[in-house]
């Protein structure tokens, strides 16, 4: 029999897999449309990072922030479940928005 905590941990991991997939798609989009990145990128930190350090650093920053969020949600899951739930919810909602934007761009 699966406990409530076990189901929550599994659901949290599934949600973070979704965040990882959307991050992967986002990185592919950035690589494909690198030439016009300053025009369409809405994040000023990403634009500054791209202008000063280049594409590899921008992609590293993108992947590292998602990885840090995942690690923090796993480390705090037993100690501070509110922090874990809040962090996971914010990551999932922001990446759900990004997935909707890509669905609109690619007419899916």
Image (cartoon, rainbow, N blue to C red):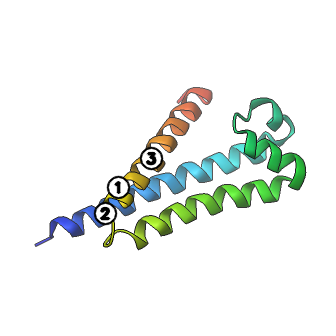
Question: Which quarter of the figure has residue 58?
Answer: bottom right
Are circles 3 and 1 on residues that touch, CB within 8 Å? no
Are circles 1 and 2 on residues that touch, CB within 8 Å? yes
Vertically, is 63 above or below 100? below
x 56%, y 26%: residue: 104
What numbered label is drawn on residue 81?
2
Total count of labels: 3
Residue occupied by mark 3:
90
> Is the residue marked by circle 1 packed among few (<14), some (14-19), or many (20+) residues within 10 Å?
some
Where is residue 66 drawn, in percent x and y? 57, 58
Give the residue at the far left of this rendering.
Answer: 1
x 74%, y 45%: residue: 45
Q: CA distance from mark 3 to mark 1?
A: 9 Å
x 33%, y 66%: residue: 80
Q: Quadrant of the N terminus?
A: bottom left
> Is the residue marked by circle 2 packed among few (<14), some (14-19), or many (20+) residues within 10 Å?
some
What numbered label is drawn on residue 106?
none
Residue occupied by mark 1:
85
Where is residue 34 drawn, in percent x and y? 82, 42
Mark 2 secondary-structure assignment: helix
Vertically, is 84 above or below 47? below
Whichever of callouts 3 and 1 sits on the residue coming sooner in the sequence is: 1
> Which residue occupies the foreground of this view, 19 or 44?
44
Vertically, is 3 above or below 30? below
Question: Which quarter of the figure has residue 5?
Answer: bottom left
Mark 3 secondary-structure assignment: helix
> Which residue occupies the foreground of this view, 84 or 26?
84
x 64%, y 46%: residue: 26
Are circles 2 and 3 on residues that touch, CB within 8 Å? no
Where is residue 17 drawn, in percent x and y? 46, 58
Q: CA distance from mark 1 to mark 2?
A: 6 Å
């Amino acid at each position: 029999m699966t406990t409530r905590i076990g189901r929550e941990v599994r659901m949290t991991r599934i949600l973070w897999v979704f965040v990882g997939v959307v991050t992967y798609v986002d990185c592919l989009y950035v690589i494909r449309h690198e030439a016009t990145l300053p025009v369409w990128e809405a994040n000023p930190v990403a634009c500054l990072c791209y202008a000063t350090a280049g594409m590899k650093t921008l992609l590293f920053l993108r992947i590292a922030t998602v990885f840090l969020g995942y690690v923090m949600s796993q480390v705090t899951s037993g100690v501070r479940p509110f922090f874990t739930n809040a962090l996971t919810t914010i990551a999932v909602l922001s990446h759900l928005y990004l997935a909707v934007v890509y669905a609109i761009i690619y007419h899916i």
